[in-house]
């Protein structure tokens, strides 16, 4: 069993948890993910590793409450245990040879973008972070990003915090102002990553996007997480989760991502009703 | 006096139009009377041809003679001398091409129902109160087993019986490998699989789930840091193949692995399951092996009208005859000489139909089966909302990619000698990880062989 050592609400729909998982912590690298189950009848859900502490043997996860399982997860508290917790899965972010990188995060994707920014910063890479949220209530990890970046741009859809606009607007401005990036790493909603990658393609800047598709086993067995990259079928769990952003078929990924939306909505409602009764 | 009936004792089964709506076991097993009557059909041949057809050489006439005498405990003892998983093999072995194909009684009439008798004996044993297990004296040596499928369980069991300290590492949250995630409940109840695993644990085997060797820990770390003197790789062939035709990544297209994993491992067929599954109102399964039959029969049980699309004819179907028969009885529709070329989508990116090329048979190919060739210009379109690709699996590349000095074939199979020894000292491999997708019994046999070689290696170190 995997104990929840710390729980913190980052905003009304995003929660951080620190989990005791020494075997996973020993090997975890930024860009990799874990799969967990909350209980013996639970589904397997993948979550990207937000942080790790090898000494303490802990893994930090940050999740948005979207479906039944994340709702159930959010109702667990410090001292409770998760049924299953396996990892680290997938390939780590490639950092070799990088000198200057723009990290572009959107929404809860920033939870995954942050450890990448931090790792690059620790390696001496110049990091510019561009992060976007719908409004000021949803902002997460602002101070952490600032500490890991030499330039930090905060965007919001409604202008209630930072600059009003999209992350692509901010990235374009930076590039136009003469910033030369070896790579842009983007993590967030598919639609955002699609437009970030379109932009970088225009400017011929290499781009990497972190994909988070539907998954079951996470070890290359089911193929549920497959996507098309440069005309070839790839499995996000073993070939990714990061891929060349200029080659990903984002439209296909969006269609596949919506496959279980109605089920997810219902599962979320059911879970809410369940906890509503308990209260 | 032997029973000279030309036909096997029928095994009771659930009626087809009842069972195709539930996930309970199809075949119900012999009664004691039926088993004894069937056992009496065995002529107890001196040269035992049936044994030569068994990949693990069970002394078949000996166990059947015990059954005929009503000594079921004695029969169980004979079987378990050679087999680790009799309740499993009695259900899923292709007996018709193995032991039963060599049976003298089969020359005129039907062979002795060896598989059904094995199953009966194992089930009889499992229904008895658990006898206290004698834990073997520890011999001070440590061995690791990667994967808890048939080869890994067989290897772990044999080593544990000799006193080795054995740890089995499993990537998923449940042990059993393909027995748990692949073969459906109605063919192999999961309680039987768990019973076998509990038996190993009682022998002292440690089972560590949630451990992906190659990611959580490497083989080198197991040997250098965790003190395992030998490692057995039984990681199976879990990587699904696709056809690489247009539309294969549409919503509603599954690999058979994904479809079956959702159902068997995650219990998605149960009311209120937190893992979703749908087979839609119509499902097309592509392929003709046992896995295709399993996927088709699961889809039927989820309420779909089900088609199996196969590019050769019924004669070339690689699935067991019994599975094909069961599938037909349950109302699965076979489309032979039909090969998919494209999957079409509706406006929302969901599967709408599958376009297939009609085929005809020509000269036999390398596999010895008649080669299907396209019939010029002949295409059909089948409307469907689910497509399940069941055209085979390859060994998972993760271990190869993370283990230095482990040689593999071009297609991914680990290279191992007769005893399972790989190119890496102290590291053995067997089952589908070496051969590519095969059967439970062959994997089990490989696990047992490797266990014997590992024993010898550790004793002479």
Image: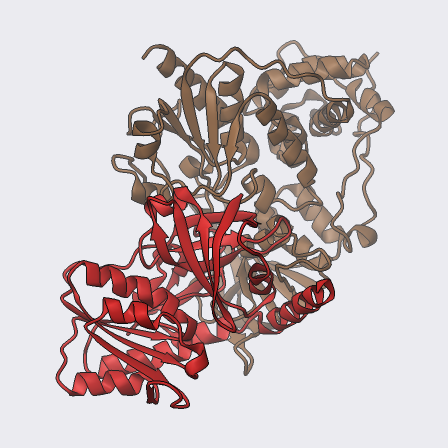
Chain colours: A red, B brown
Query: Is residue B157 shown above or below A31?
Result: above
Q: Is residue B43 visible?
A: no
From the viewer's side, name the closer residue of B56 and A186.
A186
Quadrant in the picture for residue B355: bottom right
Q: Report the residue at 68% width, 34% height from top.
A: B192
| Image quadrant assignment for residue B400 | top left
Residue A222: give x, y in percent of width and height: 50, 54
> Does residue B258 appear left or right of residue A198 in this picture?
right
Quarter of the rendering containing residue B216: top left
- Between B30 and A4, the one lying in front of the other is A4
Q: Position of residue B212 (x, y in %)?
A: 42, 43
* Horizontal relation, residue A174 to residue B39: left or right: left
In this rendering, does residue A239 appear at all?
A: yes
Residue drawn at point x = 71 percent, y = 17 percent: B131
Outermost residue toward the right in this view:
B33
Residue at position x 71%, y 60% in the image: B272
| Quadrant showing the C terminus of chain B | top left
């Amino acid at each position: 069993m995997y104990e929840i050592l710390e729980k913190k609400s980052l905003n009304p729909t995003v929660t951080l948890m620190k989990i005791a998982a020494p075997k996973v912590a020993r090997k975890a690298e930024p860009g990799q993910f874990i799969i967990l189950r909350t209980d013996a009848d639970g589904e397997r859900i993948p979550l990207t590793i937000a942080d790790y502490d090898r000494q303490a043997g802990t893994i930090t996860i940050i999740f948005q409450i979207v479906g039944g399982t994340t709702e159930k997860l959010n109702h667990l508290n410090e001292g409770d245990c998760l049924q299953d917790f396996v990892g680290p899965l997938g390939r780590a972010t490639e950092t070799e040879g990088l000198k200057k990188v723009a990290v572009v995060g959107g929404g809860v994707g920033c939870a995954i973008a942050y450890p990448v920014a931090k790792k690059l910063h620790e390696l001496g890479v110049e990091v510019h972070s561009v992060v976007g949220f719908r409004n000021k209530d949803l902002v997460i990890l602002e101070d952490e990003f600032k500490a890991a970046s030499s330039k930090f741009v905060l965007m919001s859809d409604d202008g209630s915090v930072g600059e009003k606009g999209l992350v692509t607007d901010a990235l374009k401005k930076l590039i136009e102002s003469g910033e030369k990036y070896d790579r842009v790493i983007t993590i967030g909603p598919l639609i955002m990553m699609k437009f970030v990658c379109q932009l970088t393609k225009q400017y011929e800047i290499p781009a990497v996007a972190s994909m988070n598709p539907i998954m079951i086993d996470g070890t290359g067995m089911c193929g549920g997480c497959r996507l098309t990259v440069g005309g070839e079928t790839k499995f996000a769990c073993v070939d990714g989760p990061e891929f060349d952003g200029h080659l990903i078929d984002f439209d296909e990924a969006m269609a596949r991502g919506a496959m279980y939306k109605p089920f997810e909505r219902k599962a979320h409602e059911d879970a809410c009703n369940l906890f509503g009764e308990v209260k | 006096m032997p029973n000279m009936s030309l036909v096997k004792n029928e095994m009771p089964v659930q009626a087809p139009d009842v069972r195709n709506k539930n996930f309970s076991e199809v075949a119900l097993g012999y009664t004691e009377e039926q088993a004894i009557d069937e056992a009496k059909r065995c002529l107890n041949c001196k040269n035992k041809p049936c044994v030569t057809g068994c990949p693990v050489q069970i002394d078949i006439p000996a166990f059947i003679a015990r059954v005929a005498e009503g000594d079921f405990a004695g029969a169980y003892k004979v079987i378990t001398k050679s087999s680790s998983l009799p309740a499993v093999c009695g259900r899923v072995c292709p007996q018709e091409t193995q032991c039963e194909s060599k049976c003298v009684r089969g020359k005129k009439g039907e062979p002795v129902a060896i598989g059904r008798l094995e199953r009966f004996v194992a089930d009889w044993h499992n229904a008895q109160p658990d006898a206290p297990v004698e834990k073997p004296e520890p011999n001070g040596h440590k061995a690791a087993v990667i994967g808890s499928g048939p080869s890994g369980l067989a290897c772990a069991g044999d080593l544990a019986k000799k006193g080795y300290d054995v740890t089995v590492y499993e990537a998923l949250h449940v042990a059993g490998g393909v027995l748990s995630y692949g073969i459906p409940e109605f063919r192999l109840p999961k309680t039987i699989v768990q019973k076998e695993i509990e038996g190993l644990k009682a022998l002292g085997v440690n089972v560590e789930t949630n451990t992906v060797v190659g990611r959580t820990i490497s083989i080198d770390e197991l040997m250098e840091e965790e003190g395992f003197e030998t490692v057995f790789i039984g990681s199976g062939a879990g990587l699904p193949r696709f056809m690489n035709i247009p539309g294969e990544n549409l919503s509603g297209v599954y690999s058979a692995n994904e479809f079956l994993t959702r159902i068997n491992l995650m219990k998605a067929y149960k009311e209120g399951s937190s893992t979703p599954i749908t087979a839609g109102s119509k499902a097309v399964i592509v392929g003709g092996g046992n896995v295709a039959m399993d996927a088709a029969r699961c889809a039927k049980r989820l309420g779909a009208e089900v088609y199996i699309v196969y590019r050769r004819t019924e004669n070339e179907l690689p699935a067991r005859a019994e599975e094909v028969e069961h599938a037909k009885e349950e109302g699965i529709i076979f489309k032979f000489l039909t090969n998919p070329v494209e999957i079409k989508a509706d406006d929302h990116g969901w599967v709408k139909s599958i376009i297939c090329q009609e085929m005809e048979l020509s000269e036999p190919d390398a596999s010895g089966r008649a080669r299907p060739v396209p019939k010029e210009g002949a295409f059909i379109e089948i409307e469907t909302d689910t497509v399940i690709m069941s055209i085979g699996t390859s060994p998972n590349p993760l271990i190869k990619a993370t283990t230095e000095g482990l040689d593999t074939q071009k297609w991914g199979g680990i290279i191992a000698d007769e005893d399972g020894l790989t190119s890496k000292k102290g590291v053995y491999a067997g089952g589908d990880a070496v051969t590519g997708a095969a059967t439970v019994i062959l994997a089990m046999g490989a696990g047992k062989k490797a266990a014997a070689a590992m024993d010898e290696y550790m004793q002479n170190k």
